[in-house]
Amino acid sequence: MEDFQFASIVVSTIRNAPVLIFAAMAGLFAERSGVVDIGLEGKILASAFVSAAVAYTYQDPWLGIAAGILASCALAMVQAFVSITQKGNQLVAGIAINIAMSGLTFVVAQYFFQQGGRTPDLGEARLSTVVLPGSELVADIPGLGWFWTRLIGGHSPLVYFAFALLPIVHWVLFHSRFGLRLRACGENPHAADAAGISVQRTRYTAMLIAGVLCSFSGAYLSIVQSGFFLRDMSAGAGYLALTALVFGNWRPVYTVLGCIMFGFFSAVQIQIEGVDLPVVGRIPGSLIQMIPYIVTVVVLAGLMAKSVAPKALGKPFVKSR
Amino acid sequence: MKTTELPRWASGFVLPVLNLLSALLVSALVIHLLGESPVESLQILFNSAVVNPEGLSYTLFYASTFVFTGLAVSIAMKAGLFNIGAEGQMYLGGLGLTLAMLSFDSTLSAWLLIPLAIVASALFGAGWAFIPGYLQAKRGSHVVVTTIMFNFIAAGLMNYLILKMVPEGDQNPASRVFDDAAMIPQLSTWLPFFGENTPLNLAFFLALIALVIYWVAVSRSSWGYKVQATGLNAHAAHYAGVRISRTIIVTMLISGGLAGLAAVNSILGSTHYLSLNFPAGAGFIGIAIALMGRQHPVGILLSAVLFGALIQGGFDLSLEKPNIPQETFIFIQGLIILFCGAMENMYAPAVLKLINATRRKG
Amino acid sequence: MQPAVEFRNISKAFGPVQANADVSFSIAKGSIHGVIGENGAGKSTLMSILYGYYHADSGQLVINGAEQKIRSSLEAIDLGIGMVHQHFMLVENMTVLDNVMLGTEGGFKLSKKRTETEAKLREICTRYHLDVDPLAVISTLSVGAQQRVEILKQIYRSAEILILDEPTAVLTTQEIASLFDILRLFKEQGKTIILITHKLGEIMEITDQVTVMRAGRVAGAVATRDTSKEQLANMMVGRPIEGNLPRKPHAPGAPVLQVENLQLKDANGVQLLADIALTVRAGEIVAIAGVSGNGQSELMEILSGMRLPTSGTVTMEGKPLPFAGRSNADGLPATFRDLGIGHVPEDRLRDGVIKDFTVMQNTVFGYQDRVIKRGLFDFDAIAKRCAHLLEQFDVRPKDPNVRIGLLSGGNQQKVVIAREVSASPKLMLVGQPTRGVDIGTIESIHTQLLRLRDEGVAILLVSTELEEVRALSDRIVVMSGGRVTGELHIDEFDTTRIGLLMGGMHKS
C-alpha cells in the first residue's frame, strides 16, 4: 500500500513539473537578459485558452499548441515593448498582462463557446501518451514493468520535451554565442553595448523565446492535464515558476530542481486529501490547496538574501555617456 | 525657450487622461470585435451608472470600497512597494469585522459596534500584510510575489473558515446575517433621491475622511516625507536617518489596514454577512486606481468613482449584452494598469513637442 | 604623415547644452596625445563621438586620412579605434576570456573560438607585459588588473588608436607607473594613444601633444615640451587658478572625534579596514588622502552611522558612538546627527539628496523631524530657512520649488553643504566635496569649509584630489589598503612621499 502511494507520487511529480519547468525556463531567458517577467501567469493563461480552443475547433492538438505559441509570443512582445522600448515599470507591465488575460480569456471563451468561460472538453483531441518500445514485454515484470511503462515511459510528449529542455537551455545559456550575449545584457548591459551588442535586440529575442517556452506551459495545462480551459486555471503557476528561479539562483539545473520540488508538493497534496493523517486527522481540501503558496513564501523568506539575481535585472537600459 | 521637462499640469493631468483614453480605445475595439457597438455599450453603461439615481448610488457605493483599496495600494507605492495583496487583506479584514460582529452584535449598540468593526477590519487587514512586509524589510523577499501568495493563501483559509461559519441548514456559503445593530445607515435614509434600499452608506464619508488623512500624512507630515524618501531612494533615505525596515513594515501594515477597511463598506453597508469571495476583485481594482490616480488623493477619488461606474454599468451591460460579461471589465482593468502604470510616459515626447511648438508661436 | 585622427568642426548639443562647439584638432599617428579639461569641458562627449556612441550634429571625422561616419561602436572598432572607459565595461561574474570574446565570438558555438582566443590572449599578455590570466573571473581581480583586461580587450580587437578615459583615477602610484610603461610600449609599436585626463602631472609626464578643452571648445593645442602645468591650468580654467585661500593659523581645540582600533570586515570576511586610528580636533581640517577604493568610503560610512564597524571604538566629544548591541545600522545616521555630526556624502545623488524632491524639501533632508509644529511640517519656518540658505550659499537658480535633479552638480552640492552647515554640527564629515563641480563653485566650497574650520568645527575631509588636500588641510592622514599608512602635518606636504604612502609604502 505504501509503495503504491510512493510510486504514484513520483509519477505525479513528473507530470506536475512540466507546467512549472516551461514557465521557469521562459522566465530564465527573460530575466537573465535583464527583464523581469512577472507576466508569466498571463502568458500561461492566454496560451492555455488559445491552444485548447484551437485544438477543440480543429480537433488537432498540435495546431492548438502552435496557436498557443502565437498568443503567448504576442503578449511577450507587448511586454517587451513596454519594458524595453518604453522603459516602463516591468512589474506593473507583468501584473497588467496577468489581470488583462484573466479577464480576456474568460470573455473570449464565453463568446465562442458559451459554456461559462471555459472551452469544451477536448475528448480525443489530446496528445497521445508515448509508449516506449518493448513496453508490452516488460509490463508484467514487477519493478521494471512499472519503471519502464509508468516512470520513464507512458507520459505525454510534452513531458519529455520539458525535461529535454534542461540540457538544451543549459547549453544555449553557457556554451553559445547567444547565451553569452544574453548573460552580459543581464549582468552589465553597458559592457554588452560597448562590445557592439544591441542590448535592445538581445532582450527582445529573450522575451520572444520566453513567449514560446511559456506557451507550452499553458498548452500542457489545458491540453495534457485537464483536456479543457477553465477560468484562471493557472492558479499561480507563473509565480511559482519565478520562485523556482530564485530557488535555483537563475541556473537551469537548480531551477528545474525547484520545479520538481513544487511538483512533488502538488503530488503529495493530492494524496493527502481525504486521508486520515496521524495527529492532525483529515486536513480539509481548502487548507491543502494553500500548501504550494506557503512553500513559496517559505522559500522566498529563507533564500532571498542569498539568491543572486542577474545584476541588471529590472533596470531598463539607458545608454549613459 | 524649449523645455525638456513637462510642466506639472501636463504630466499630472494630460498624460493620465491620454493613457486612460488609450485603454478605453482598445477596450472599444475589443467590444466591437465581440459583435457589439462600443458607443451603444458606453450609453448603456453611462445611463446605468450615472444617469439613473439608483445606479449612481451603486456607483458611489462601489467607489467607497475602491477608495480604500486604492489608498492601500497608493500608500505602499509611495514607499516603493508594490502591494498586490489588497484582495487578500480586504478578505481578512472582512473576517476580523465578522468575528467582532458575530461576538458582539447582540450585546453592544451600534455606536460601539461600528467603530469596533472599523478597528477589527483594519487590524486583520494589517495583520495579513505583516508577514510580506516583514519579509521584504528583513529578508529582501519581494513583496510582489509574497503578497500574491498571501492572496492565494487567504482564498484557501477563508474558504475553510467561511464554510465553518455557515449556520445549520443554510445552503448559502456565508456566515449568518448580523443583527440590525451592526448596520451602517444607508444614505438613502436622508437622500431619497438615491432610491430605496441602495447600499450607498455612511462609509462613503469614511472613505472621504481617509482620503484627507492620506493627503495630510503624505504631504504635510514627516512620516509621509520619510515614506516617500524610502520609495524614491532608499540609500539616501538611510543617509537621512530613516529607519528603512520599520518604514517598510509600518507602511505595509497601514496599507493592509486600509484594504481591510474596504470590508466595512462592502459588508456592513451592504450584505451584513461574510460571504465567499466577497472582495470580488476590489483589491486588484485598487491597483488600477492607484496607478491611474497617480497616488494623489483627488486622482484616487476620481478613479474610484470611474471604476465604480464601470462595475455598476458593467453589471447592467452584461445583463443586456451577454457577449460583454462582467469579466470584460477585468480585462479593461488590466489595460488601464498597462497604459497608466507601465506606459505612463508613452505620450510624453509628443506632448512635449506640442507644448514647445505652441510656446514658440506664442 | 597623415594624422591618425582629425576632428574637423565637430559640434554636438544635448538640448540647450552645447557639449562640443566647433572642435578642430588632429592627433598624430604613433603619439601619445593628451586631452585635458575640467568636468563638463566636452572631452568625454568628443571621445564618445569618435567611438560611435553619439553622432555629431555637424563636422567631420577623418581617420587615417579618410573621412568616416562612425555610427556605432562596432564601426569604430572596425576602424581600429578602441576605448578604455573610466567605469569598466566588464561583466563581473564572467572570466576574462568571456569578456574579451563578447562581441567577437566567431560562431554560434563558443567552444572552438575559446581555445583560439585564450592562446591569442596569452600571447598579447606576454608581448605587452600585461600580466593577466585569461581564465580568471573578473570579480577576483584588482582594479589595476581589471583595467589591464580592458586594455587587453582593445588590443585583441586590433585597436591601433586607443582612447583612455581618466585611466588613473583608480590606480595607485605604482600601478600608474606600470600603465605608463605599457603605453610607451604601445607607442613604440606605432599605436596612437589618446589620454583623457584632468591631471596635469600626468600630461606633462607622458604625452607628446596636448589639446586643452574648455566649455566645449578647444582652448589651446600645444606640444607638451613647449608648455608647463601652470600654462595648461590657465588654459583649462581661463583665468589664474586660486592661490592660497586665507585662513587662521592652525590652533586646534579639544579633540572632537577619536577613532581607535577600528576594524571592518565585509560579509565574505575580507578585511576592508584594519587598525584605523585618528583624531580630529575642533577648529582643524584633517584630510584623508588616498586613491579611492582603499577604505576611505567605508570609514566615512562608519563615522556617519551608515554602517557598523566590526570592532573598535569611536568617541564623539568623549562619549562612545552607539554602535554596540546593534545588528545593523538602520536609523543610526539620525542618532549621529543628534550627536552633532554633519555629513556631506561622497555620492551626492545616491546618498545626499532625493533627485525628485524640490530644493526646499532637500534642505530638511536628514533633519525632517526637527522642523515640526503640532505634529506636521512647519512650512513657514522651512520656507524662511530655505530662502535664507539659498541666498547665503548662492544657489542658482534661487527657486525653492524646482526639483533638485535639475540643478547643476555644483549647485546641488551647495544645497547639501548649506543644509549640513546650518545644523551647526560639531563634527563635519565631508566626502569628495568638489567632485563633479565646476571650478567657480569649487572655490566657494573651499572658502565655506575654511570658514567652518575657523569657527571651531572639526572637519574630516576625504578627497582624491591632492590639490584640494593641500589647499584645505591642517593635517593629512594617508590610507592605503584599508590601513593608515602615514600621517603628516601640512607643512610636511610632499607629493612624492604622499604618493608612496598612497601606494602602500608605510612610513618606517
Image (cartoon, grey):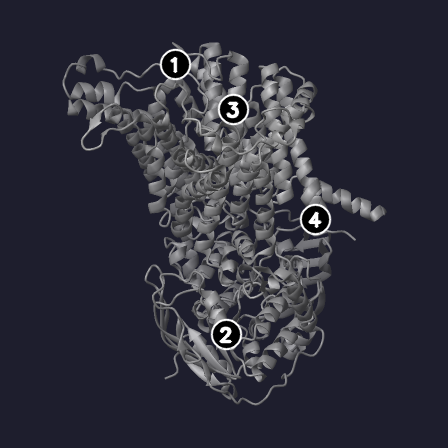
Task: Tell me if I can see residue A182 in this picture.
Answer: no
- Is residue C463 shown above or below B115? below
Q: Are marks 2 and 1 in contact (CB under 8 Å)?
A: no
Residue position marked by numbered label 1 in the rendering:
A126
Three-letter code for the amino acid on which mark 3 is drawn? Ala
Name the amino acid, label 4: Arg
Q: Chain of mark 4?
A: B
Any mark on residue A71, and which?
A: 3
Mark 4 surroundings: few (<14), some (14-19) or many (≥20) residues within 10 A: few
The residue that appears at 55% across and 73% down in the rendered structure is: C465
SS for dot 4: helix
Q: Residues within 10 Å of mark 1 (few under 14, many from 20)?
A: many
| Disc 1 residue type (three-letter) | Arg
- The image position of residue C88, as x and y in percent, is 50, 57
Q: CA distance from mark 1 to mark 4?
A: 57 Å
Determine whether label 3 and label 2 are within 8 Å by CB. Answer: no
Residue matched to label 2: C340
Q: CA distance from mark 3 to mark 2?
A: 62 Å
**Disc 3 vs disc 2: which is toward the camera?**
2
The chain carrying label 3 is A
Q: Which element is circle 1 on?
A: loop
Residue A310 in the image: above or below residue C241? above
Eye-nearest disc, 2 or 1? 2
Tags 2 and 1 both on a single chain: no
Q: Which mark lies nearer to you, 1 or 4?
A: 4
